[in-house]
Image (spheres, rainbow, N blue to C red):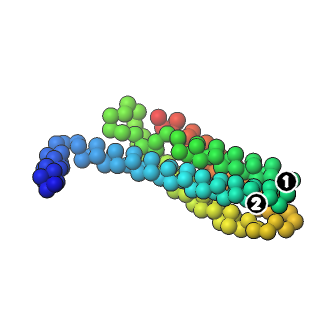
């Protein structure tokens, strides 16, 4: 076991000596970070979707079917956005990619991504505010707020994709 660790340490030293390898590894780490951030956002959106699906089930059992179309619309929008984020283009190009994204452009993409995280947190707060017992139109009011937030998030994701297409 220690022989393998020693070999790995030696390989790290050798790679550190080769010019440009350190930069390459940093860039690839940025790609991985970008991917992980998008995976996190997508997973958070999936959790929100699951919570709404539970609300749909609860309302179905209570025979409050008139509220389901709005909630189903939010569920569909959440799935669309989760997929859109998960499968979005990388915010960072690799060292061997033909088209490059400059540092200031990359910073703008990362700011977009971090704002997306904040938007998802606000949606989680909205979900927590959904009434447990549906009294009157309060549930539909909160779902409408959520749909508005989802629309704004969709717009931001499309802006991110547009930026990437302009940079690339």
Q: Secondary structure at mark 2?
A: helix
* Front in this rendered view, residue 21 or 2: 2
Residue in the image at 60% along x and 56% along y: 47
**Figure quadrant of residue 57:** bottom right
Residue in the image at 64% along x and 55% along y: 50
Residue in the image at 28% along x and 43% along y: 24
Quarter in which the N terminus is drawn: bottom left
Q: Badge 2 is on which residue?
A: 58
Mark 1 and mark 2: Cα distance apart in space: 10 Å
Mark 1 touching mark 2, by CB under 8 A? no
Residue 8: give its label. Answer: none
Mark sitting earlier along the chain (1/2): 2
Q: Badge 1 is on which residue?
A: 65
x and y, in percent, of residue 140 in the image = 81, 59
x and y, in percent, of residue 5 in the image = 16, 54
77 lies left or right of 115? right
Above/below status of 70 relative to 167:
below
Tell me if I can see residue 68 in this picture. Answer: yes
x and y, in percent, of residue 97 in the image = 37, 33
120 lies left or right of 71? left
């Amino acid at each position: 076991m220690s022989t393998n660790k020693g070999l790995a340490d030696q390989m790290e030293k050798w790679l550190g000596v080769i010019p440009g390898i350190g930069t390459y590894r940093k860039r690839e780490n940025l790609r991985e970070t970008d991917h992980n951030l998008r995976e996190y956002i997508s997973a958070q959106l999936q959790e929100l979707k699951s919570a709404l699906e539970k609300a749909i089930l609860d309302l179905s059992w209570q025979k409050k079917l008139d509220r389901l179309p709005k909630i189903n619309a939010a569920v569909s929008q959440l799935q669309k956005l989760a997929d859109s984020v998960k499968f979005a283009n990388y915010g960072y190009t690799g060292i061997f990619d033909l088209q490059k994204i400059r540092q200031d452009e990359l910073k703008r993409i990362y700011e977009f991504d971090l704002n997306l995280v904040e938007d998802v947190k606000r949606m989680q707060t909205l979900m927590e505010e959904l009434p447990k017992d549906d009294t009157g139109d309060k549930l539909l009011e909160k779902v409408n707020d959520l749909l508005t937030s989802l629309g704004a998030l969709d717009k931001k994701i499309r802006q991110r994709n547009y930026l990437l297409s302009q940079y690339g």
